Image (spheres, rainbow, N blue to C red):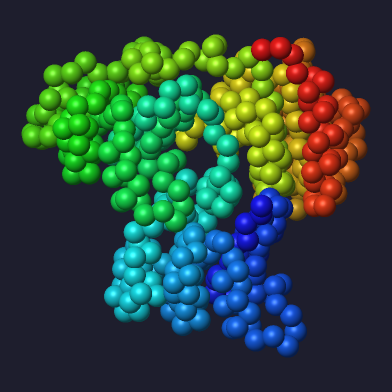
Amino acid sequence: MRRQVLISYHKSDTALVQRLDDDLLKRGIEVWRDTRSFKAGQSRRQATYDGIVKSDCFIACLSPQFLKDAFCRTQLFLARAYNKQILPILVSSFPPGTSPIIELLKAGQQHGHEIKGIEELDLADFSGKYSYGLGSYERNFEKLVDAIQPVTKPVPLKSELIYVSYNYREENFATRLAKDLELARGRIWIDKLSIQLGSTWRKSMYEGLRTANHFVVCLSPEAARSENVSHEVLVAKMRGIPIYPVSSERVNSDAKLRSKLETALNKSDEMKFLADLQWFCPDPGYQDLLTALKKSIGLAEPERILKQGIFISYRRADSQAVTGRIHERLVQEFGAETVFMDVDTIPLGEDFAQYYKGWLKDRAVVVLIIIGKTWASIKIKKKKGEPPRLQKEDDHVRIEVETALKMKGLKVIPVLVEGAKMPESADLPESLRGLNLLEGSEVRNDPDFGSDLGKLIKGINKSQRPG
């Protein structure tokens, strides 16, 4: 059953909301929006209120203008009163010298139950101005979709929960480690990936600490001085669960940082005992740390997990939303471990090019090239004389396709979306000239999406080899 979503926003934020609206519709999500969802002669205000009652989810597009607007605040109040799933996202910058959380706290004090408490919910920044969520519109859009209609995750080998604690200075390392443990089919809790958008982050953190069976703490001088990290360590120690101290390449390779870390640990009553434990270190490299940690926790090695895979190559600016929908359907059919899509698969902080090249080489059997209307023509900068991205040798999409076409045993399938046509030879660099000779597959939007994807899945099944 499809869930209905209502987008609440201030008219000054229309440009970003229009992009969000288009992307949600392409994902097959039913969206209520004031510019489309009520008829001539209806009261806009009453139609909006009715839309809130009928919807399952309420996307609050937060901005300074939204917080000042009485109609926007009333919509948020009604959605909370009717116990709708509140999904707060940032769509605009706030005044210099302050932050969205501070402005939400101020608005809560001024307007009471209309706003109060929203600052306790997990936010995602769609404006690109702040660090809330997963760092970009594309990643945060996937997080939003996952909150509306949860995406299938790899089935854990063990039900035991692994809690990952860190300070924000080690965010990239911690999320990379958590994602790799998840790909090894561990059941992971880490705030950036595990707190659902709109959930009360503090409640989610306490639940993770209460139920965790393993506790990984990413050590750094900042973490050793962090009140939050020390409290998390305290709970893990009091519960008597295994604690795994790990250090990143940044800390391990810097003697001064290691010395500062040891000093800070010895000054902390809660974390002092960690100074006497053997740490998991990237010695000689990160993969050695990961292998040792997985072995201690009891997770499988990569070669036991995956023997075949489907690699999805696409341009975010060309076909992000419809590609995400294709990815969801393929995950349902083949399993989350088997399907590669950069936003969902590449851990934060990982070397982008190295990771996807390794996946193509070691796991891929089928490569889907998702081609939208601007796949071959889109430019980095809209300047006169600027060549399309595809003509640049360092373009990631070009490298993905070149790599796939050169590899023996790979089935490469062009997939045309959004009404796109196969690029002409003249529009392709010489290294990709064979692409337009391949048999492609068209995937149209609703009502044809399901039948078109069914045909694509049949073609993939014919190409799969035993694991």
Residue 173 can be seen, yes or no? no
* Left or right: 444 in relation to 240: right
Query: In front: 2, or 33?
Result: 2
Task: Give the residue drawn at x 67%, y 22%.
Answer: 309
Identify whether 443 is placed above or below 48: above
The location of residue 257, given as percent across then percent down, is 22, 28
Q: Is residue 135 visible?
A: yes
- Residue 450 screen position, x and y as percent: 79, 43
Left or right: 343 in relation to 237? right
Comparing 78 with 31, the one in front is 78
Q: Position of residue 189 (x, y in %)?
A: 38, 36
**What is the quadrant of residue 268 in the picture?**
top left
Image-quadrant location for residue 45: bottom right
> Residue placed at 54% from the left, 74% from the top?
10
Quarter in which the C terminus is drawn: top right
What's the residue at 60%, 83% (across, down)? Answer: 46
27 or 51, nearer to the observer: 51
Q: Position of residue 458 (x, y in %)?
A: 82, 28
